[in-house]
Image (tube, grey):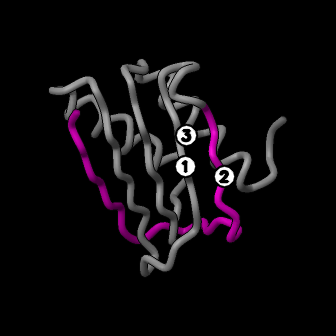
Amino acid sequence: METLQYRFENGRRTLPDQPRVVGVVGSGNLEVLIESAPLGGACSIEIKTAAVGFGATWAAVMHDFQQRWQLADARIAINDMGATPAVVSLRLDQAVETMLGEGA
């Protein structure tokens, strides 16, 4: 297992104070927990992954995600068992949409 951590400063969009879990490790190989947290306007992301050595790919996916959503005061935990970057992006977007009451 590898643990990767990212922190993005100066986000603009805050989330409601209700943690949500989207996805299941046994289904789609990915679990995402997103919650609001007092981080001084930052978004922190911790990834625990079985796919060791893909740090550059994870960094690109996380930067793209933060560019789309500009989250502030948000903590995200990802438990990955080999999901593709497309699945990771989808699950992250679903988590934010769920928090904001958007989407299905």
Disc 1 to disc 3, how far (Cα)?
9 Å
Q: Quadrant of the C terminus?
A: top right
In this rendering, would 32 be left or right of 7? right
Disc 2 to disc 3, how far (Cα)?
11 Å
Q: As shown in the figure, which amino acid type bears the numbered disc 2?
A: Arg
Disc 1 to disc 2, how far (Cα)?
6 Å
Q: Quadrant of the N terminus?
A: top left
Q: Is residue 9 magenta?
A: yes
Q: As shown in the figure, which amino acid type bears the numbered disc 1?
A: Leu
Element class at badge 3: helix
Q: Residue at x 80, y 46 (%)?
A: 102
CB atoms at circles 1 and 2 under 8 Å apart? yes
Q: Which residue is mark 3?
A: 92
Q: As shown in the figure, which amino acid type bears the numbered disc 3?
A: Leu
Element class at badge 2: strand
**What is the number of the mark on residue 33?**
1
Give the magenta range. Answer: 1-23
Q: Residue at x 43, y 21 (%)?
A: 83
Q: Earlier in the sequence, mark 1 or mark 2?
A: 2
